[in-house]
Structure formats: structure tokens, C-alpha cells
Image: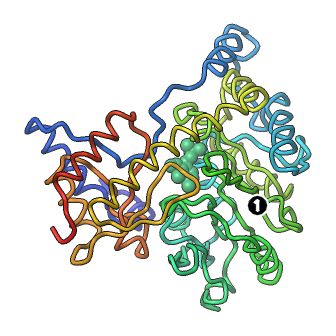
Amino acid sequence: MRVSARLDRLPPYLFAELERKIAAKRAAGVDVISLGIGDPDTPTPGLVVGALAGAVADPGTHQYPSNRGRPELREALARFYERRFGVELDPDTEILPALGAKECIFNLNLAFLDPGTVALAADPGYPVYAGGPLLAGAEAELMPLLPERGFTPDLQAIPQDALGRARLMYLNYPNNPTGAVVPPGFFDEVVAFAQEHDFLVVHDASYTETTFDDYVAPSFLETPGAKEVGIEVFSLSKGYNMTGWRTAAVMGNAEAIEAYWRLKTNIDSGMFEAVQLAAAAALDEGDAVPREMSRLYERRRDLVISALREIGVEVAVPRATIYVWAPVPSGHTSASYCELVLEESGVAVSPGGAYGPNGEGFFRISLTVSDERLAEAMDRMREGLRVGS
Ligand SMILES: Cc1ncc(COP(=O)(O)O)c(C=O)c1O
């Protein structure tokens, strides 16, 4: 059997070795605590589950959905964006539901890229920003996110050749995996740069609702001129504990959204309408949910930061997301440190290099296990690890 050349272009799966070691530890009876994946451990709120139960009992939701989405969901998204960000959107032309931010980001590559063209992708970053362009037969030009620039790309450092062929730029604030938030003025710089170089900005807003210490994350679409050059992908996965529901939406530039819709009608048949109505209920009635979840993650963040400091890992305190991004102690690579943590403490954390070359030298801790398990993981790390070990 031969797989496509397109599939062969994907880089090796960098978590594979770590996953193999975790499985071996578990098989040997070790109670491994995994802080690897960012998937909320608490259930989807009752108001959303209740709304789904009501909607699913209505036969009117049972047939093929339209990829345009139910007006109830598009209107709820428009109300949410107006209330939360002060951004006005036309529910008919500037909003489209997506089956998760991941689906949307991947398919945008198919909608906008051809062989020879480029997507500018944050490094480190959510892996689909770099893998999606390859699967679309195009190229990803990685934009380093460095701590000294607050994990924002240096736009002036993007090579001219790549810039000339760029059709998309992926950005994501609050940021996975670094936990960084967008510095004031950066989105304005991006809008001017996209106008000058004529590419579409895709801002991944998966973490805007998970913020700490009174920080309120902006939408990219709040930036003057953003709608002319960009779109934003908003997801209910993390803020509303709905990862399994596959609920997201893309908003902003109407022409870009129409292109995504044209592609999508050839690929999938939209979001189950009962889920659309449940997502609308979450957006209309669930403002308290992400606030409450943020308080939970803020507590867990503090626990992790103090434990890391005790074992000599100096770490910047994130103001958003469900991750702590920490430098590995000197003498280690990301992978060797993650192996050491697993070996010495039975705790699995993610090697930064898996998120791109500029993730090397860091590791990521996810805050999505129960308080008790997280506290136990930190106790084990305190006992098992010292600087230089
Ligand atoms: C930055 C980022 N974008 C998108 C996603 C996927 O979101 P969704 O569940 O909406 O597909 C994730 C999930 O971890 C993420 O970290």
C-alpha cells in the first residue's frame, strides 16, 4: 500500500517516543500523572448539557445541517462578540460555525494555499499551523516566537521571498504553548503589515476566555482595519469545557468566510443542529462559565509556579491559557528533561520541541487535571527533581 506524498511530507510525530515511555511505565504499574494534553477535566456546564437535551428531542434538529449554521448560533455569536469585545459582526456574512478550531484552521489552508505559496506560522505553535500548509501542498514559513520579544514574531525578520509568496499568517493570543498574551500595539502592527503585503491574517482566539489576574484578552477583530485583512477563529472548547463537542466559529472578513464556506460544503455537512443550539445557549447564558474556569486554572497555575520555583525552575507567570511554559534546566534538551521528569516522578509533561524548533529548551505543563492530582504531581516533582539533576 502506498500513502500519498502529501502524507509523507508531515514531520515525524514528536510525542511518539514519550507516549511509548508513558505506556511502558503504566504497564509496569507506575501511576503516571499526565500533564501533557490540554483537555479540561471538569464537565461541560449543566446549562449547555440541558440545552442539548432539549434540542436533541426536537426532530427539527435531526437532518443534515446547513454549513451556514443555524441563525440562532450565528446570532448568539454576534451578540457575544458585541458584548464581550465590542465587535460588530453581520451574522449572515461574517460568521460561520466550524467543527472545532482545528478543522477550521486545517481547511483554511485548503481554501487559500496553492503549491508554491506560503503560510506564515508561529514557532512554537499549535501543530496544525505548520502541518496544514504541508498537507495543502504548500509551505509553512516559521516565525520564531522568542521570550525576549514577549513571544511575538518579528515581522521585519520574515524573509522577503516567503513574504512575497505568503497568503496566510497564523497568530494565536493568548498563546499555546507559551501562555503569552498580546502586547499592546502588536495587532495594529499586524494589520498594517498584512495590508502592505496582501495576505490574510488568521487569528486563533481559542484561549481569549481563559485569563488570570484581571487580564482581559482582546479579539484581533477589535483592531481598526482587522476585518479588511483578517478573520478570527473562536472556539468554545477550552473556555466552556466543550472539547468533545467540536464547537467553534470563524468570524471577520466576509470574502474569506465565503471562500471557507465554498470549500467546506465539499468536505463536511456541518455541525449537528442540536449542538449548535447548545452552543448558542452557552454563548447567551454562560458568561460566568469561563470566569469560573479561569479562577480554577489560576489557582492551579499558582500551585505549579511555586513548585517549579522550589525545584529551581524559574518561570514567567502566565496571565492566560491552561499551560505553564517553563525553561528546562541547563544541560538538558526538552526531550531529555521530559524523560527525566517521567523517570524520577512518574509525571508526563510535554517537550517544547514538539511545538516547533523554537520550543526547544522549554517544556509545557497543562493545568487540566484535578487539583488533587496536580498537587500530587508537584509533590512528586519536588521530591524527585533538583536543579542539575
Ligand atoms: C491554539 C489552539 N488552537 C486550536 C485548538 C483546537 O481547538 P478545537 O477544540 O476548537 O478544535 C487548540 C487545542 O488545543 C489550541 O491549543
Residue toward you, 198 or 204: 204
* Applied colour scheme: rainbow
Is 70 situated above or below 342? above
- 24 relative position to 96: left or right: left
Disc 1, ligand 1: is the CB inside 8 Å? no
In the current view of this chain or complex, which residue is farthest to the left? 28
Residue at 38% x, 53% y is 365
Q: Where is residue 258 in the image (x, y as percent from the top left)?
A: 82, 52
Task: Say above or below: 150 vs 325.
Answer: below
* Amino acid on which the number 1 mark rests in the picture: Phe
Which one is nearer the viewer's eye here, 199 or 115? 199
Which residue is under mark 1? 220
Residue under the image location 14 percent in, 53 percent down: 344
Q: Quadrant of the C terminus?
A: bottom left
* Quadrant of residue 295 within the rendered picture: top right
Residue at the outermost bottom position: 160
Q: Nearer the viewer, residue 16 or 326?
A: 326
Residue 22 drawn at (x, y percent): 20, 47
Q: In this view, does 203 lie to the left or right of 138?
A: right
Q: Is mark 1 on a helix, strand or loop?
A: helix
| Residue in the image at 72% along x and 9% along y | 59
- Residue 220: quarter of image: bottom right
Report x, y in % for residue 79.
86, 37
Assess disc 1: are there few (<14), some (14-19) or many (≥20) residues with their C-alpha within 10 Å of its C-alpha: many
